[in-house]
Image (cartoon, coloured by chain):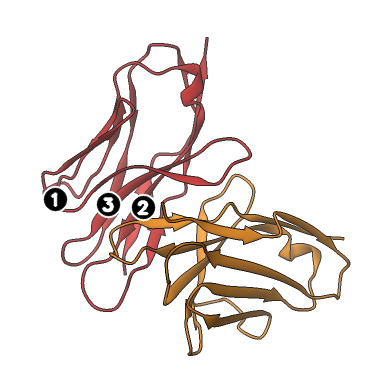
Chain colours: A orange, B red
């Protein structure tokens, strides 16, 4: 069945550096993907909608220059956390609706720790 | 805008107890409603869903009925097991327009004790 895969599953980076997280739809095409972040013991907060071939749509309060999203193909969206700081440490999850638009699939999530 | 409110946890129950986790929503039109479960250290999994009023979603002994009159989608299970211990998220998908966003509640931690 349809699967959404994220890479890496976890990453540790130094403060001030940038880190990229990939989200792939493995056996279906996704013109739209979504990026969420989840702080410990909190809910998933939608960060942005990634649109293939066009600019991402960011939710209010999300810094677009800090969280760069690129949806270069129908199966790949990337989230780059630029100039990361410890407060960016979080669990990042991507998702995509399948071709029918009836089922949404979530990636396994990526743990980011900024030290 | 659309929003989801669910009861705060943690909810602590003994095995075989009855479970209810309340969820209410605010939305225009006719949203679709979902319950997701997140087991420790894992990603989100769809538990059940309902796409129109009076629909009942069910899976693994869990049930939830889409009540438009009370804007609710409460999760229930007649007899919980230790393996049900997880965080449960109620979610809403907007109706119409170009939106396919899922809006999540804050999650409710369920701890089932043997």
Query: Which residue, given by chain and number where applicable, does mark 1 sit on?
Result: B68
> Residue at position x 32%, y 48% from top?
B34
Query: Which residue, given by chain and number where applicable, does mark 2 sit on?
Result: B91
Image quadrant occupied by the N terminus of chain B: bottom left
- Relative to A68, is A104 above or below? above
Say which of marks 1 and 2 sits in front.
2
Choose the circle earlier in sequence order: 3 or 1. Answer: 3
Secondary element under disc 3, as helix, strand or loop, is strand
Instruction: Determine crowd level at label 1: few under 14, some 14-19, many 20+ residues with C-alpha closer than 10 A.
Output: some
Say which of marks 3 and 1 sits in front.
3
Query: Which residue, given by chain and number where applicable, does mark 3 sit on?
Result: B33
* Chain assignment, label 3: B
> Residue at position x 48%, y 90% from top?
A54
Choose the circle earlier in sequence order: 3 or 2. Answer: 3
Secondary element under disc 2, as helix, strand or loop, is strand
What's the distance in space between the residues labelled 1 and 2, CA to CA?
15 Å
Question: Residue A106: horizontal and vertical position, in percent?
Answer: 49, 55
Instruction: Determine crowd level at label 2: few under 14, some 14-19, many 20+ residues with C-alpha closer than 10 A.
Output: many
What's the distance in space between the residues labelled 3 and 2, CA to CA?
6 Å
Q: Are marks 3 and 2 in contact (CB under 8 Å)?
A: yes
């Amino acid at each position: 069945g349809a699967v959404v895969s994220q890479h890496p599953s976890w990453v540790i980076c130094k403060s001030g550096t940038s880190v990229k997280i990939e989200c792939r739809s493995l056996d279906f095409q996704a013109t739209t993907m979504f990026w969420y972040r989840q702080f410990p013991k909190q809910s998933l907060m939608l960060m942005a909608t990634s649109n293939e071939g066009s600019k991402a749509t960011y939710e209010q309060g999300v810094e677009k220059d800090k969280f760069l999203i690129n949806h270069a193909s129908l199966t790949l969206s990337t989230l780059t956390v630029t100039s990361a700081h410890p407060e960016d440490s979080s669990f990042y999850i991507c998702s995509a609706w399948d071709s029918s638009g009836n089922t949404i699939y979530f990636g396994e999530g990526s743990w980011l720790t900024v030290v | 805008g659309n929003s989801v409110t669910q009861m705060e946890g943690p909810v602590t129950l003994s095995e075989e107890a009855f479970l209810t986790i309340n969820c209410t929503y605010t939305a225009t039109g006719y949203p679709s409603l979902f319950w997701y479960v997140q087991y420790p250290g894992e990603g989100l999994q769809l538990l059940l869903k309902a796409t129109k009023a009076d629909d009942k979603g069910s899976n693994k002994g869990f049930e939830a009925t889409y009540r438009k009159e009370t804007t609710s989608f409460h999760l229930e299970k007649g007899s919980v097991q230790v393996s049900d211990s997880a965080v449960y998220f109620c979610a809403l998908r907007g109706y119409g327009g170009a939106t396919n966003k899922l809006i999540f509640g804050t999650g409710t931690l369920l701890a089932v004790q043997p």
